[in-house]
Amino acid sequence: MMHDGLMNYIGGKWTEASSQETFPTTNPATEEIIALAPRSTADDVDNAVQAARSAYKAWRLTPAPRRGEILFRAAHLLSERKEELARLMTQEMGKILAETRGDVQEAIDMAYYMGGEGRRMHGYTAPVEMPNKFGMAMRDSVGVVGLITPWNFPVAVPSWKMLPALIAGNTVVYKPSEDTPATAAAFVKVFEEAGLPAGVLNLITGAGDTGAALVANRDVRVISFTGSTETGLRVYTQAASLGKKVCLEMGGKNAILVLDDANLDLAVEAVTWSAFGTTGQRCTATSRLIVQKGIKAKLVEALEAKARTIKVGYGLDETVNMGPLVNEKALTKVEKYVEIGRQEGARVIVGGTRADMGQGYFFMPTLFDQVRRDMRIAREEIFGPVLSIIEVADLDEAIEANNEVAYGLSSSIFTENVNAAFRAIRDLTTGIVYINHGTTGAEIQFPFGGTRGTGNGMREAGQAALDSFTEWKSVYIDYSGRLQRAQIDTEAILRDS
Ligand code: UN1
């Protein structure tokens, strides 16, 4: 069988890896190889970085509104190509079409948003201490930035990094997940066609060692990483030893809190799709349900009934609600956690097994009842369609349970009580908080990221995204025609003015 040969994109040219080696990318629903991608070496990475370095000279001087126009063109092309990209993404990483369309839409939204930043990207002025002097602070580009991105949002998440980096005048070397190189190449093609100058955006595919070479490359000034906590912390340590700025988005163990007074039907819908949407493979997915004891029996019964209606299958079939896990390793990990949960004494009330489709990495939507807060399935990230149900007595206990895990990305509370809702907003210690909505569905104009083990204090999206990809430059302009000394000459200033 012939496969598409994917290429790296370096300095405006589509090229093979210097080793000529490749690796396959596979459809997780059918286990068919859909393409072969270059296995890039440290030399390829360095070629891409040098291409980005030389393109930086002109790109940083291109007026930001003009850079923005290219982003608008990319937004337009992405809209035209939304269906094509969505279908490719479903085939390559498994989530259903409705979700892959949403994934592309996030990139379109981000391209318009960041294109608009080309005419904003505000700095500020402030009063200065001396007469005949002016002061301002402005955002400046950094140089070459390195992006390392996951397979679960293979267009949206790279767009959150690439678009703010580009609008700020940086050039980019982009290393996508080895599970989604075909989607990555199709995404980069959009920017080529939108007229991005050669070398401004470079693509290198490969495995962990390719990413490690990018992190180690001394000419890369910023690393923005989304992925597992384990890899993220390794990236952080190495990048820090080279003095780089790092933006990390890592694991999650998000919870929905449901109080006794909640709208039950609404909570059932939200919990179901936050837990099982994208087969539970979102960093914002709900993997814990923290439920007050008065509503628990009714809620669990309704969730169980709902979970049984979920149709598992190939994401290209529009009647399917949940696709496969991304690969065999992910499937094995989910199976392992189900076993751990059972051994810890929790009870599987729905699912708990592979879904037999003849081929592919399918697992049934799984509900675990009688989960204690100290169990591993209540604390560790599973990244699959498994929900742990934890009973609590009241709001205080619910908040405490939410906050005690090692991660802090997203949380949500269902209540009709405004006082409880405001207390939750104040006391839930996650980067994102929802009221009467699931834990997924963050919009691109607000900061995205989490506390504790989820991140390192940086945020993506919104204005906060610019913080990863800019340096502040403070500028003082003295138009007095003489040497004025701030701080030491206040009396002289008063005398002279
Ligand atoms: C992710 O899982 O890495 O809020 C991103 C959401 C989506 C993005 C998730 N807008 O669920």
Image (spheres, rainbow, N blue to C red):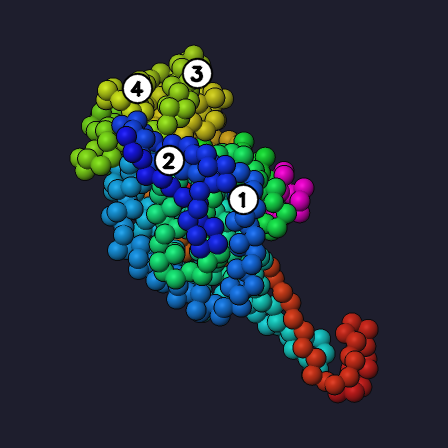
Specify whether tag 4 is near ligand 1 (CB below 8 Å).
no
Give the spatial CA distance, label 1 vs label 3.
Answer: 40 Å
The three-letter amino acid code for the residue at tag 4 is: Arg
* Residue at which label 1 appears: 45
Where residue 164 sits in the image (x, y, percent)? 47, 56
Q: Is residue 395 visible?
A: no
Q: Secondary structure at mark 2?
A: strand
The three-letter amino acid code for the residue at tag 2 is: Leu
Instruction: Give the crowd class for mark 2: few <14, some 14-19, many >=20 residues within 10 Å.
Output: many
Mark found first going from the N terminus, 3 or 2: 2
Give the spatial CA distance, label 4 vs label 2.
Answer: 28 Å
Indicate left or right for 159 with 53 as reference: left
Query: Which mark, by number, is residue 340?
Result: 3
* Residue at which label 4 appears: 354
Mark found first going from the N terminus, 1 or 2: 2
In the image shown, does 217 or 466 lie closer to the viewer? 217
Taking the spot 30% from the left edge, 26% from the top edge, the residue there is 31
Q: Quadrant of residue 133?
A: bottom right
Give the spatial CA distance, label 3 vs label 2.
Answer: 36 Å
In the image shown, does 84 or 467 lie closer to the viewer? 84
Where residue 101 sits in the image (x, y, percent)? 28, 46
Mark found first going from the N terminus, 4 or 2: 2
Q: Secondary structure at mark 3?
A: helix
Is 442 colored magenta in this rendering?
no
Q: Nearer the viewer, mark 3 or mark 4?
A: 4
Instruction: Give the crowd class for mark 4: few <14, some 14-19, many >=20 residues within 10 Å.
Output: some
In this rendering, the answer to whether 427 lies above or below 219 is above
* Residue at which label 2 appears: 36
